[in-house]
Image (tube, grey):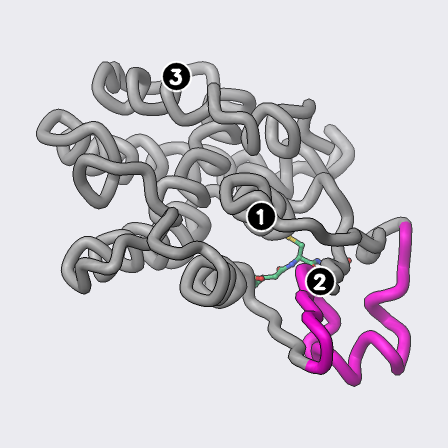
Amino acid sequence: MMTIWGRANSLNVQKVLWGLEEIGLAYERIDAGLQFGVNDTAAFKAMNPNGLVPVLKEDDFVLWESHAILRYLTVRHGHGTLLPTDGQVAALADQWMDWSGSIIWAHMRPVFQNLVRTPADQRNMQAVAEGCAGLAKSFLILDDHLKKQPFVAGDVFTIGDIPLALLMFRWVYLVQERPDTPALDQWFKNVSGRAGFVKHCAAPLT
Ligand SMILES: N[C@@H](CCC(=O)N[C@@H](CS)C(=O)NCC(=O)O)C(=O)O
C-alpha cells in the first residue's frame, strides 16, 4: 500500500499526485503541512527529518524529495511510462526536472511567497520584480527549446514536463506581464489538458 503525506495545494505534493495519476497507481493521501500540522511531529520527522512534504511510504520504504519520488515511481512502477528506458531521453527528462528546481523555482519562490503567502502591506515588491525578470529570461530558454520538440525531453511526455508545467501555471497565474512564448504556450495547453493536471494541479493558488 502506498501513502503520500502532504497538503493538496503544495507544488511539490502536486508533482507526485500528477505522476501517480499518469501511472495509475492506488494510494492514500494524508494532509500534512501548514494549517494541517503533522509535519512537525516526531513521528513525521522520523520519516523526513526536514519536516517537509511530500513523503512517500510504500510498505517499509520511505522516500522524500519530490523529484526523487517521481523517479522512484516511474522506475519501480512506471514500466517505461514517464521515464523512457532510453538512458539519454531519461537523462534529458532529469535535466529539465532539476533545472525547474534550481533555476525556475529560485525565481518563482519570492514571487509566490510575496504574492500568495504575504499580506499586501508587507510584500517585498523589489524581490517580486527581480523574480519576474528571472522568470521571463528563464522561460524564454524553455520556449526556444520547445520550438524544436513537443515535450521537454523529446517526442514523449516524461517526468521532466511535470514540475515545469506546475511552475508555468504559477507564472501565468501570478505574472501579467510576460514575454511572448508561443512554443511554451502550446506545450502548456497540451500538458495542462492531461487528467493528472486537471485533477490535482489546476486549483487557484493558496
Ligand atoms: N525539495 C523538496 C522541497 C519540499 C518543500 O519545500 N515542501 C514544502 C511544501 S511545497 C513544505 O513542506 N513546506 C512546509 C509546510 O507545508 O508546512 C521537494 O521537492 O520535495
Q: Quadrant of the N terminus?
A: bottom right
Please say whether residue 56 is one of the residues in the magenta stretch. Answer: yes
Q: Which residue is mark 1?
A: 20
Q: Which residue is mark 2?
A: 2
Q: Label 3 sits on what residue type? A: Lys
Task: Return the x and y of residue 103 as percentages of the image width and height.
Answer: 34, 52
- Picture mark count: 3
Depth order, front residue of 176/60? 60
Pointer 2 or 3: first along the chain: 2
Taking the image as drawn, is residue 44 in sight?
Answer: yes
Q: CA distance from mark 1 to mark 3?
A: 21 Å
Q: CA distance from mark 2 to mark 3?
A: 31 Å
Q: Secondary structure at mark 1?
A: helix
> For mark 1, does the 10 Å Cα neighbourhood hold few (<14), some (14 to 19), or many (20 or more) residues?
some
Q: Label 1 sits on what residue type? A: Leu
- Mark 1 or 3, closer to the camera: 1
> For mark 3, does the 10 Å Cα neighbourhood hold few (<14), some (14 to 19), or many (20 or more) residues?
few
Pointer 2 or 1: first along the chain: 2
Residue at 90%, 53% in the rendered image = 36
Q: Which residue is mark 3?
A: 189
- Determine whether 178 is above or below 51 in the image: above
Q: CA distance from mark 2 to mark 1?
A: 10 Å
Q: Secondary structure at mark 2?
A: strand
